[in-house]
Image: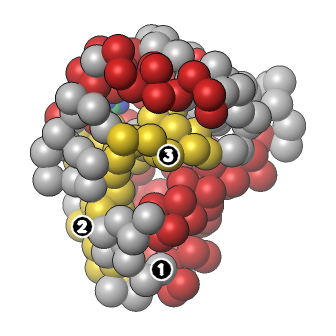
């Protein structure tokens, strides 16, 4: 599914965040230490190679909601934007911290004049955020930011499976039709 709002294309796809050849910056659902981990962080660091962890080391640790930007090393992109999502039930308020992740990641993209950004569904794996609620927070936040975006003209959600894609598409419909 694809929507164009305020001149920005927003789309949902199923795939691997580490295989987004046509995207300038991919977002990492990172850990505080910006180390290789499971899920998205594992996929991105494995594909990027050890240079990514090395570049990350002086930037760590980060707090929930924060974001930092690095090069993409062996990934097919120019940048990786690393953000630490809230652990559901632990880092509170979860919705505000999750919104900060999307806001800060997009701010870094704008600061680096980036045209296209691919997000995974932050916090919905190991960090346990219910995916429906997380998708609503993601699109509500993006809707608020959209009118102010100058360089970003494509935001792609790369979802793990069709279930996650459908949940995101339903949230997208709800939020962008009002
Ligand atoms: N491409 C796209 N989506 C993916 C991929 C992939 N290759 N792999 C998993 N997902 P997670 P979090 C989905 O756990 O919840 C890590 O170990 C997954 O199904 O990657 O923010 C870090 O080191 C889920 O919907 O991120 C941290 O410690 C979503 O991406 C911690 O997990 C996010 O899952 C971060 O946890």
The quarter in which the N terminus is drawn is bottom left
Task: Between label 2 and label 3, give the one nearer the viewer.
Answer: 3
Estimate how packed mark 2 is, as few (under 14), some (14 to 19) or many (20 or more) residues with alpha carbons within 10 Å.
few
Residue sitting nearer the eye, 17 or 125: 17
**Residue at screen point 61% across, 45% down:** 67
Residue at mark 2: 2
Measured in 3D between alpha carbons, the distance from the residue under mark 1 to the one under mark 2, in whole angstroms, is 18 Å
Tag 3–tag 1 contact (CB < 8 Å): no
- State the SS at label 2: strand
The image shows residue 154 at horizontal and vertical percentages of 30, 67
**Image quarter of residue 177:** bottom left
- State the SS at label 3: strand
**Image quarter of residue 63:** top right
- State the SS at label 1: loop
Q: Which mark is residue 149?
A: 1
The image shows residue 32 at horizontal and vertical percentages of 67, 24
If you read the primary sequence from the N terminus, does the residue marked by circle 1 or circle 2 appear first?
A: 2
Residue at mark 3: 69
Residue 75 left/right relative to 147: left
Residue 131 left/right relative to 60: left
Measured in 3D between alpha carbons, the distance from the residue under mark 3 to the one under mark 1, in whole angstroms, is 18 Å
Q: Is residue 89 above or below residue 132?
A: above
Q: Count every numbered label the image shows and give the total.
A: 3
The image shows residue 81 at horizontal and vertical percentages of 47, 44
Tag 1–tag 2 contact (CB < 8 Å): no
**Residue at screen point 52% across, 28% down:** 56
If you read the primary sequence from the N terminus, does the residue marked by circle 3 or circle 1 appear first?
A: 3
């Amino acid at each position: 599914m694809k929507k164009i709002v305020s001149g920005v294309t927003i789309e949902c796809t199923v795939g691997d965040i580490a295989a987004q050849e046509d995207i300038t910056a991919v977002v990492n659902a990172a850990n505080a230490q910006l180390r290789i981990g499971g899920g998205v962080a594992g996929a991105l660091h494995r594909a990027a190679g050890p240079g990514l962890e090395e570049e990350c080391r002086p930037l760590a640790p980060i707090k929930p909601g924060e974001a930092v930007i690095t090069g993409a090393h062996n990934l097919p992109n120019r940048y990786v934007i690393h953000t630490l999502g809230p652990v559901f039930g632990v880092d509170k308020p979860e919705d505000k911290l999750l919104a900060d992740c999307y806001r800060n990641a997009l701010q870094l993209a704008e600061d680096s004049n980036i045209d296209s950004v691919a997000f995974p569904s932050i916090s919905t794996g190991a960090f346990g955020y219910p995916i429906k609620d997380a998708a609503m927070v993601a699109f509500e936040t993006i809707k608020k930011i959209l009118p102010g975006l100058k360089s970003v003209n494509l935001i792609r959600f790369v979802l793990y499976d069709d279930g996650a894609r459908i949940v995101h598409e339903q949230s997208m419909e709800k939020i962008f039709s009002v």
